[in-house]
């Protein structure tokens, strides 16, 4: 029998396999690609251009822009217009905080804070970022110390607290700016003498926190009480929470604050390791 000849017009060369496009593993590709974008943004220290997101994930640019538009409308990404880049939005932070509220972080943090309180004799707490607020998820009260406002479940403006400042200082500056875009972000309800109430003052203060390695607060939440805090970071160096101690300022002279800060930082580093994160530099 003669060999069958296939007409040349029907012969097609196989398409080259894409090196970046993912395998079709999902019946809901839009949902899968949305999660891939969130994971990518969460893995970077700063915002990304949409074109870079498309290249990194092997997706069409038009699809990426459509997905980013929906995610922006729902608060999961922020579009930084001046930089033409996208970063994680407040809703993404709230998901992270929701994870913390489901107790893995508080369960890991409670025994570490209890040991710190036993050593220093002052109250300590663990807080996470929730929008522009900090949410307190663990409080360890020292014996014979006054009650504090930082009970578990309490939310306070992050820019007024040592815990919040420690977390904000560990964020990229562009992310902080996105959280505090205008004067309305600084609620007048919490205005006290000497409090930070505008972005320029907050930015300057956070620069000092980064240089010093820890955050402080002097009576801006409760008059007469001071706090020292250090950030807990994940494997990417992203701030997950903050460990803080609060005390009556007249009991602790200013020259003793650095020594206490070193203890707080040590506990924050220990908790970072427990969540498979990074120690401070």
Image (tube, helix red, strand yellow):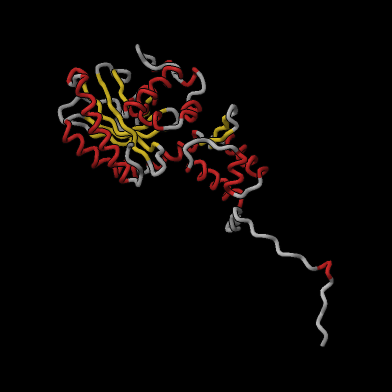
| Left or right of residue 274, residue 175 in this image | right
Please tell me how many numbered marks the rendered image carries: 0
Q: Is residue 22 above or below residue 139?
A: below
| Residue nearest the viewer, comparing 82 with 190 | 82
Instruction: Return the residue found at the far top.
Output: 193
- Identify whether 56 is placed above or below 69: below
Q: Which residue is nearer to you in this view: 237 or 35? A: 237
Residue 162 spot, x, y in % from top left: 33, 26
What residue is drawn where x is 24% and y is 37%?
113
Quadrant for the N terminus, please.
bottom right
Q: Farthest residue toward the bottom?
A: 1
Residue pictured at 66% horizontal, 47% vertical:
60
**What residue do we see at 81% from left, 82% from top?**
3
Question: Does residue 19 appear to the left or right of 15 in the view shown?
Answer: left
In the figure, residue 73 lies in which quadrant?
A: top right
272 lies left or right of 34: left
Percent across and percent down for residue 261 are: 25, 29
Q: Quadrant of the C terminus?
A: top left
Which residue occupies the foreground of this view, 21 or 148? Answer: 21
Q: Is residue 60 toward the left or the right of residue 167 in the image?
A: right
Residue at x 39% of width, y 15% of height: 191
| Coordinates of residue 82 in the picture (x, y in percent) | 59, 27
Q: Position of residue 121 (x, y in %)?
A: 16, 30
């Amino acid at each position: 029998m003669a060999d069958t000849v296939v007409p040349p017009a029907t012969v097609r060369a196989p398409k080259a396999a894409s090196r970046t496009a993912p395998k079709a593993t999902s019946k809901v590709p839009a949902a899968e690609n949305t999660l891939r974008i969130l994971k990518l943004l969460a893995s970077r220290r700063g915002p990304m251009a949409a074109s870079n997101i498309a290249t990194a994930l092997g997706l069409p640019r038009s699809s990426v822009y459509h997905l980013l538009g929906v995610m922006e409308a729902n608060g999961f990404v922020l579009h930084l217009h001046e930089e033409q880049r996208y970063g994680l939005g407040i809703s993404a932070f709230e998901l992270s905080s929701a994870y913390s509220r489901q107790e893995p972080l508080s369960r890991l943090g409670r025994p570490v804070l209890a040991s710190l309180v036993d050593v220093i004799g002052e109250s300590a707490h663990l807080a996470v970022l929730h929008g522009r607020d900090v949410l307190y998820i663990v409080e360890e009260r020292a014996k014979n110390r006054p009650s504090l406002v930082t009970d578990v479940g309490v939310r306070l403006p992050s820019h007024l607290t040592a815990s919040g400042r420690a977390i904000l200082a560990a964020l990229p500056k562009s992310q902080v700016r996105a959280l505090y875009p205008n004067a309305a972000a600084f609620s007048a309800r919490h205005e006290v003498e000497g409090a930070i109430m505008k972005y320029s003052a907050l930015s300057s203060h956070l620069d000092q926190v980064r240089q010093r390695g820890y955050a402080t607060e002097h009576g801006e939440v409760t008059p007469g009480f001071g706090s020292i805090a250090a950030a807990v970071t994940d494997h990417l160096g992203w701030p997950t929470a903050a460990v803080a101690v609060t005390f009556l300022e007249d009991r602790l002279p200013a020259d003793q604050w650095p020594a206490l800060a070193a203890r707080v930082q040590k506990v924050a580093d220990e908790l970072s390791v427990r969540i498979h994160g990074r120690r401070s530099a």
